[in-house]
Image (cartoon, grey):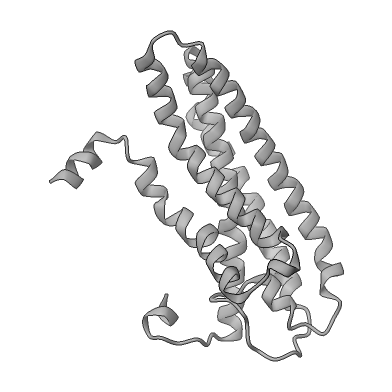
Amino acid sequence: MANALWDSNTISYSGCAAQVFMFAVFTPAEFYVLTIMAYDRYIAICKPLHYGTIISGKICVYMAAAAWGSTLLYAVLHTANTFSLPLCKGNVLDQFFCEIPQILKLSCADAYFREAGLIVFTACSLLVCFLFILYSYMQIFRAVLRISSEPGRYKAFSTCLPHLAIVSLYTTTGTFAYLRPPSMSSSSLNILLAVLYSVLTQAVNPLIYSMRNQVLKDAVCK
């Protein structure tokens, strides 16, 4: 943020490491929290009478602790592994922040083999989360379509659509950013995709999740 405000394009080595660590914490944590929210909506719509028992305060604390604890461990391992590599191919990153793939391009070592284990673990965990979200919404849509009243269906869909929009934007941009073919790679496209999945989705979270909050609506109108 300081670099953007003061029109600077330099960052210290320690600052870059801190940025990588924060990015490695908050990016997967966002997706884990989205997965927990999908589970919350599934219970609220498909098992409403058991909601208070299943989604208790203690369960919420456990789920949040699991999400943040796993991402903190992942971030420590990923950051330590990235910055233990010798960087000898200059000091210019083709990105507006310290992104791990761009840092690996500056390494003299065969970095991709060292990163393979962490990358596979991350991909598998995110795939499991995505499949769980997909299963939750399949069950939600089945339950909603069985609701006889139109206002009831509208209320259920309006609860889920903002969350589903964020999940779709987050997964499509993140997946395309890291899994697209090299022939489609360019500096401007890299920056655009990074802004979409690392800045835009997090920035609109408070707005989208509060759209149905009457207090917020009244404050905006005022």
Image vertical order of residue 161 relative to residue 110, above or below: above
Q: Residue furthest front?
A: 183
Name the quadrant containing residue 103: bottom right
Image vertical order of residue 42 relative to residue 130, above or below: above
Count all numbered tags in the image, as a single digit.
0
Q: Which residue is found at the position 55% from the left and 57% from the top?
A: 26
- Left or right relative to 107: residue 43: left
Q: Which residue is found at the position 63% from the left and 87% from the top?
A: 92
Give percent across and percent down for residue 86. 78, 85
Q: Residue furthest left?
A: 222
Q: Which residue is found at the position 44% from the left and 82% from the top?
A: 3
Give percent across and percent down for residue 177. 64, 61
Q: Which residue is found at the position 69% from the left and 61% from the top?
A: 178
Closest to the observer, 90 or 178? 178
Image vertical order of residue 37 relative to residue 87, above or below: above
Closest to the observer, 13 or 184? 184
Give percent across and percent down for residue 132. 66, 33
Closest to the observer, 58 or 143? 143
Image vertical order of residue 71 relative to residue 141, above or below: below
Q: Is residue 64 visible?
A: no
Quadrant placement of the N terminus: bottom left
Q: Is residue 87 visible?
A: yes
Give percent across and percent down for residue 186. 64, 74
- Left or right relative to 192: residue 101: right
